[in-house]
Amino acid sequence: ATARLTSSTNRGEATVTATSGGMSGDVVVNFVAGPPEKVSVSANPGNLTANGTSTSTITVTVLDVNDNPVADGSTLTLSADSGTLGNHTPTTTDGTATVTYTAPNSVPAGSQATIRVFTTNSKTGTATITLIGPQIATISLSANPTSLPADGASTATITATLTVSGGGNPPDGTAVDFSITQGAAALRPPPPAQAASPPPPSPAPPPREPPPSRRLPVGEPPRSMWIIRREA
């Protein structure tokens, strides 16, 4: 005797019992999740200071077409267009995977980082994190020199020194805007640093002269020859 069992749309199991003549038997059928279909990505917190140390927890939830969590151990691939991820290929547990994201040292173009997630069957999900500059606590300016001839050509170097809340210096790449609030003058960016010139090549050593050859006096036979004299 046979019976046809139609699966549920929910992950789980069904126990089927058959009875006959006062006897019975059981069998269990498991309903497993289908392939990934829906990918959701979240970041907590969603705003970070771009100081190279602030972190956010990235949570990825992957479901099949019927909203069942995918099978444990499903591999995901993550990428970030700015900042770093603690794990680029996490696996799911009960349909979920978490990864730690660390902010970059400076605010990127657009002031956002995009986290992208890919499943093995090319389903995707994204999350964005807003990146802000560090909280500047103080800024001081110095000029070198502090006095210039009014000739329209002489220049001084203006240096801005910044500190951030909590102490320390802001990360490299922090934007600083200079402007003239009083007086007539012009501001220009400093000239690019010139690379040090390579040292001149070492002079080639003078050619070695062959040792002078020894010339025999006229009439003297070469020493490698025998001279035969005939006795009178």
Image (spheres, helix red, strand yellow):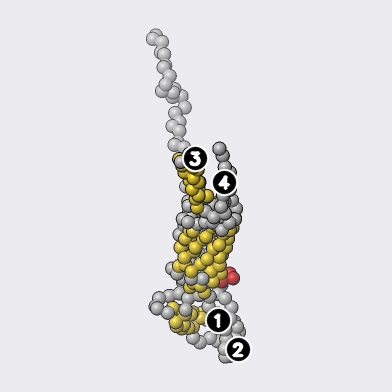
- The N terminus appears in which quarter of the rendering? top right
User: Which is in the foreground here, disc 3 or disc 2?
Assistant: 3
Point out the tag, 2 or 1, that comes first from the N-terminus. Answer: 1
Point out the tag, 3 or 2, that comes first from the N-terminus. Answer: 3
Q: Amino acid at mark 4?
A: Leu
Q: CA distance from mark 3 to mark 2?
A: 105 Å
Which residue is nearer to you in this view: 56 or 229? 56
Residue 24 is left or right of residue 40, and the answer is left
Residue at 45% in and 40% down = 23
Which residue is denoted by mark 4 in the rendering? Answer: 5
Which disc number belongs to residue 11? none
Q: CA distance from mark 4 to mark 1?
A: 75 Å
Mark 1 element type: loop
User: Which is in the foreground here, disc 1 or disc 3?
Assistant: 3
Q: Residues within 10 Å of mark 4 (few under 14, many from 20)?
A: few
Which residue is denoted by mark 3 in the rendering? Answer: 20
Where is residue 37 shown, x and y percent of the image? 59, 55
Which residue is nearer to you in this view: 77 or 176? 77
Q: Is residue 220 visible?
A: yes
Q: Amino acid at mark 3?
A: Ser
Q: Are marks 2 and 1 in contact (CB under 8 Å)?
A: no
Which residue is denoted by mark 2 in the rendering? Answer: 184
Residue at 45% in and 33% down = 213
Which residue is denoted by mark 1 in the rendering? Answer: 178
